[in-house]
Image: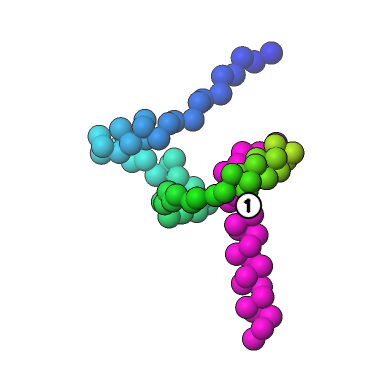
Amino acid sequence: MKNTAKKKAATADEIAELAMKGEDVSRFFTNKGEMRPPIQRVNVDFTLDMLKELDAIARDLNISRQALIKTYLRHALNQHYLARKAAR
């Protein structure tokens, strides 16, 4: 049986180091990814009752409160745009 070791993927820091040395790093990029804008942190105030509701739902779904809020907000935005489109 052949003993073949798989090469581990280079880390972002290792790739950056190669690039700073002037080496070609194009082999690490496939152009299949997607550029996303940086995340902007915001503060939102919730009532204690609303937090309790969110926490209970998040616990039932086995996800974090933050993930639940993001999911619900995305759903609400989608519904908003669908309603606007239907109204035209």
Find out whether residue 77 is within the magenta segment.
Answer: yes
Quick check: can you spot residue 39? no
* Percent coordinates x, y for residue 19 in the rendering: 30, 38
Instruction: Please identify the quarter of the rendering in which residue 79 is found.
Output: bottom right
- Secondary element under disc 1, as helix, strand or loop, is helix
The residue carrying mark 1 is 71
User: Which residue is drawn at the image coordinates 67% and 75% (left, top)?
Assistant: 83
Instruction: Please identify the quarter of the rendering in which residue 87 is found.
Output: bottom right
User: Which residue is drawn at the image coordinates 63% and 62% (left, top)?
Assistant: 76
Give the magenta range.
Answer: 62-88
Give 49 or 56, whichever is nearer the viewer. 49
Residue 35 position (above or below residue 10):
below
Quick check: can you spot residue 88? yes
On screen, residue 69 versus residue 8, left or right, reads right
On screen, residue 25 versus residue 61, left or right, reads left
User: Which residue is drawn at the image coordinates 26% and 37% (left, top)?
Assistant: 20
Give 28 or 16, whichever is nearer the viewer. 16
On screen, residue 10 versus residue 4, left or right, reads left
